[in-house]
Image (cartoon, rainbow, N blue to C red):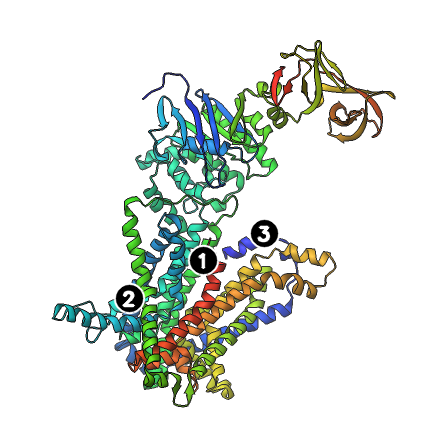
Amino acid sequence: MTIGTSAALEVQHLTKRFLSAQHAAIKDISFEMENGEMLALVGPSGCGKTTTLRLIAGLERPDAGLISLDGQVLASETKFVPPERRGIGMVFQDHALFPHLTVFENVAFGLRGRKPAKLRAAVSEMLHLVGMESLANRYPHELSGGERQRVALVRALAPRPALLLLDEPFSSLDADLRREVREQVRGILKSIRATVIFVTHDQEEALYMGDRLAVYQRGRLEQIGTPEEIFHSSATRFVAEFMGNSDFLQGRVVPEGVRTAVGLLSQAIGINGSNPVEVALRADDVDFEVDETGNAVISERFFRGAFNVYRLLLDSGQVLHAFKEHTVILPVGSRVRAYISAGHPLVVFRDGQAVSGG
Amino acid sequence: MQLTQITRLTLPRWNAARTSPRLIMAAGLVALFVAVPLVYIFIRAVAAEPEAWQRLLQTRLWKLLGNTLILALAVTSGALATGVSMAWLTERTDLPGRGIFRWMLALPLAIPAYIGGIVHLSLLRPRGGFIPQALEAIFGQPVILPSPIGFWGAAFILTLFTYPYVYLLSSAAFRRLHASLEEAARTLGRTAWQTLWQVTLPALRPGLMAGALLVALDILAEYGTVALLRYETFSSAIFIQLSGRYDRSAASILSGVLVSLAIFILWAELRLQGRARFTQVESNWRPAPPVSLGKWRLPALSLVLFVISASLLVPMAVLVIWSANSLLDPQALRAVFRTGTIGFGSFIWNSVWTSSLAAAAAVAFSLPVALLSVRHPGRISRFISRLCQVGYAIPGVVIALSLVLLVNRLLPFLYATPFVVVIAYVLRHMPQAVRSSESAFGQLSPSLEEAARNLGRTSVQTFFQVTLPLITPGLLAGGALVFLTSLKELPATLLLRPAGFDTLAVRVWIWAVDGFYMQAAPAALFLVLAAALPLSFLLRREQIFR
């Protein structure tokens, strides 16, 4: 059975329930991917992103829904292709290198039915890709974290999978190494035009790695789109909160826009009546000036090197954050007047759903 | 070696700390105490008269060597196959009843092999055995059954009562295995069955082999079963030389060869044990989903039931029936409770106090050794720790021989007292205490002690308020293990006990050898139950119940 679309991977209404709490359940997940695309699944832990990955790899059976790759159905109500016959590579969170095999043997594990000379050439090529040729005869426990990461990556890439899955592959590395390995891995994957799904709970990592992002919450797909779409026109309050460190300022819809504690936001809102809404404000959307009769006081200042972040306590009791240059240093307790300085429409939410913006 | 590498990675600060000379001294004394009997045996063996060597080389040495090695090989393979398959079935499949089977497969450790041997012998003996007789009554003519006497019987019975070592180590290894390792193999194109053979078992190999080598050491030391089934090995030959012919130079030579063999196996085991520890990764652990047995469910269940019946249910049932019989028969009852001037209570008391004293002493002696090897890793501490493991490689008969000679010469006031028996237990079972104490100290982060010092406790207060409460469970486990194995120890007790000093093991053996099975049964049952107590404590610690 084939599906008449150009999408490489197609996931439709995927649902998985678990009796035990070992994995997170997912409900009605649908998305498509193009060849050569990198998709980042992002969300808090326990939101079901890893479950989605395991379902695609064939390590779990879906309760409902359909998964197809290049037109071939991998899992449906009636069909289930076991993981060894899917041609999908996976890099595990703990790398899962076989402790009894050397680096060479680990990479060669997925390459069967080749003549020794060809096998050696194929493995060397893969190891060359990550600069690990000199360590081919080491055992996994003799490698550093970053080296293990790279071996796990080429072991999964060696059989030339149609799709590569990465399950929080950098979470076991420490911060400095993580940034370095991440850049290498993205470079390698882009250079061979791999189709990749990548799971992470780190929003910054998702923005860096993904051509598109799929934001999960409690087993549901909240929004899927390019990093810019996710960032600037969040579909739900959760996405804006999780991806952008937004403050949410209460407001009321009036004919001219939204009335808030820091003034009127004049932009067209798709709803009528004086409904209570929330405006998502990031620190770059807010500015303030010192004013003895202002509407807020500075409650804290965080020095971030190139700039300062000020925390403002509004008289209405709400909290906003605002950027200032690193030279602007004001004492805590100063009375200021805060206002919205965004040069673009802002996202407005009602009951957690976006009603206008970006 | 690898163990100390890990320790160095996780406890870097302690390298800088100065090693206390008193600690080295204490650990060194313990090592000396353990090493003396071993070294002494080698000296005696090398210094024996050339004619004695000549005589043995020409006659019995090669046959004994062949017999011993073949038996060790057969039982080790049998225990490996049984232990690993039982562990896989109970840990990694959807076998029904696996929760209770986990216990029942480990419990044969409480049954000394010679007691199991007595039961199987009485059931299967070609003439007068219970099963041949029953079959003859049914069919009206004699039915030929495989005889338990000789090599195959010994191999079968010893496999039944030693596979739990492999079973426990391999089921622990299966439990610790990361699910992702097998899942990775599946995504790289292997079926579940190929994954088992190409990834799971090879990855666990060091742990499984370490268990198998412990079995091999146990077989080298085994006396009761092989003597009962009339299969001659080094241990039984040495025993005969010692108790019957009293040829000490021949016994020394045989012991020297036997111990060399055992030390070689122990060396291999220590290497593998180190590797096994190294390969386990602790972070992000997640259990693998059980394999569905499908149509293999019934054959698998029958196999497990056969192993459990032969190693646990049948021996226990027979012991219970015999005990009931002897308690109901007034004459046998009198014999059970009063043999000469000695009563049943005194066997129990002798067993319990010697084994308890040995357990306490072994744990106490293990403390400086473990503290030194965990907190001050280095060449000296490694050497001392290794030396304290040689007890595994010295069979009971050899310890007995060495102690008979040494005590006679150096400590004559101890000669023919029960304390020699206790010393033998301590020497032989010290390694178990050392391993438990090392792992107890190894799991204790030094930062806990540093925090206590930082909060104003002296080093002594810290030891009693922080260290001791945290390591006590580990020390108790070591003590329970020593108690359990001392309770079962037969040859050293037989050879070293003062006249009339009977333990449960000794009494069971003497009665059984004389053919009074019914009379021996209550003592055997009591011995098994007494051993099952510390064993169940140990199994609970291993989290057999989940």
For mark 3, give the secondary structure.
helix
Q: Which of the two discs, 2 and 3, labels the residue nearer the N terminus?
A: 3
- Kindly indicate the quadrant of the structure image that contains residue B525: bottom left
Chain letter for mark 2: B
- Note whether A335 is above or below B242 in the view shown: above
Q: Which of the two discs, 3 and 1, labels the residue nearer the N terminus?
A: 3
Which image quadrant: the N terminus of chain A?
Answer: top left
Chain letter for mark 3: B
Chain letter for mark 1: B
Q: Give the image location of residue A211, x and y in percent.
A: 52, 22
Q: Give the image location of residue B147, x and y in percent.
A: 21, 70
Q: Nearer the viewer, mark 2 or mark 3?
A: 2
Reading the image, the residue beneath label 3 is B10
- Note whether B269 is above or below A176 in the view shown: below
Q: Is residue B326 left or right of residue A277?
A: left
Q: Amino acid at mark 2?
A: Ala
Circle 2 residues within 10 Å: few <14, some 14–19, many ≥20: many
- Note whether B385 is above or below A145 in the view shown: below
Reading the image, the residue beneath label 1 is B273
In contact (CB < 8 Å): disc 2 and disc 1: no
Q: Amino acid at mark 3?
A: Thr
Which image quadrant: the C terminus of chain A?
Answer: top right
In contact (CB < 8 Å): disc 3 and disc 1: no
Reading the image, the residue beneath label 2 is B155
For mark 2, give the secondary structure.
helix
For mark 1, give the secondary structure.
helix
